[in-house]
Image (cartoon, rainbow, N blue to C red):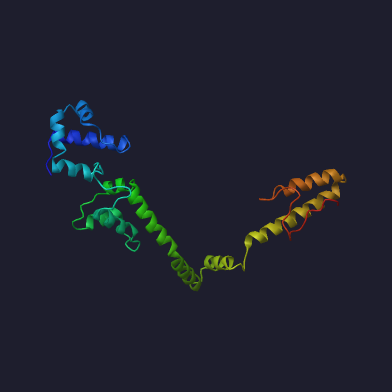
Amino acid sequence: MSLSMEMVDVLTYVEQMWWEDNQTIPTNEKIAEVTGVGLQTIKGYWKNTDFRAALSHRGVQFANDPDAGKALTYEQLTVANMLMNIQDRRSLREKLAAAEGLNVTPSQVGTWMRQPAFQTHLRKRSDDLFTGADTSANMALVKAIDAGDLKAVTLFFEMTGRYTPRTQVDVNIHSILARVVEIISIHVSDPATLEAIAGELEGLVPGQTQGALPAGSTPIPMNV
């Protein structure tokens, strides 16, 4: 690929404006005004295979490229397969470099990521992967339990309802608050003050409102 200095100037400006102006290619007149390259010369560049290839490798897409609601290109579908292959731990850059004859750059993929058709395709396939992950997650949990992982064992008991640490903590908190009010009642005789203190203490419990304790918890006495 051989580009003249003037061609590089035009290429650089087009790429700059593509990213700065919502992925829009500037008009030939604007390019000529900024770069100083002749208008007819610029028009000729758009017919130059090397010039167009250089822009494409930088992620700049032309008006006739496929997009939303249209069929993906072979290159786009190949890249989608790469992205969805979770068994291949290599980076996308490494995958692209190793793919013979693909000739796609990370910049191009970055542009495709903004195209509705490509986004929709990846979203649907990633949703399928997520839905199908239940079996893998269950198997991983069983393996961790077999290995004696205490966190995995605890998670299993929580999932099966045999261990609910949050409920136990809430009950203990209410028991402690009730005991606090009992202690305060020894030193405070005014019922209104005691009721106000009890209400304030109830308000300290996350997710509770004053005077509303969850069923089965130890109530805070109001008439001690």
Which x, y percent locates residue 208?
Answer: 69, 50
Residue 90 at least partly seen: no
- Is 64 left or right of 160, judged from the image as shown? left
Viewer-proximal residue among 64 and 111 = 64
- Is 224 left or right of 122, judged from the image as shown? right
Question: Where on the picture, by quarter, is residue 23?
Answer: top left
Q: Residue at x 62, y 66 (%)?
A: 163
Which x, y percent locates residue 20?
Answer: 31, 35
Q: Residue at x 46, y 70 (%)?
A: 139
- Is 174 left or right of 63, judged from the image as shown? right
Which x, y percent locates residue 140?
Answer: 45, 68
Viewer-proximal residue among 191 and 13 = 13
Q: Which residue is outermost to the right?
A: 189
Indicate whether 114 appears above or below 36. Answer: below
Q: Residue at x 14, y 36 (%)?
A: 45
Indicate whether 117 appears above or below 162. Answer: above
Q: Residue at x 24, y 55 (%)?
A: 74
Instruction: Name the quadrant of the N terminus.
Output: top left
Indicate whether 74 appears above or below 53. Answer: below
Residue 70 at least partly seen: yes
Which x, y percent locates residue 165?
Answer: 63, 62
Q: Which residue is outermost to the front?
A: 69
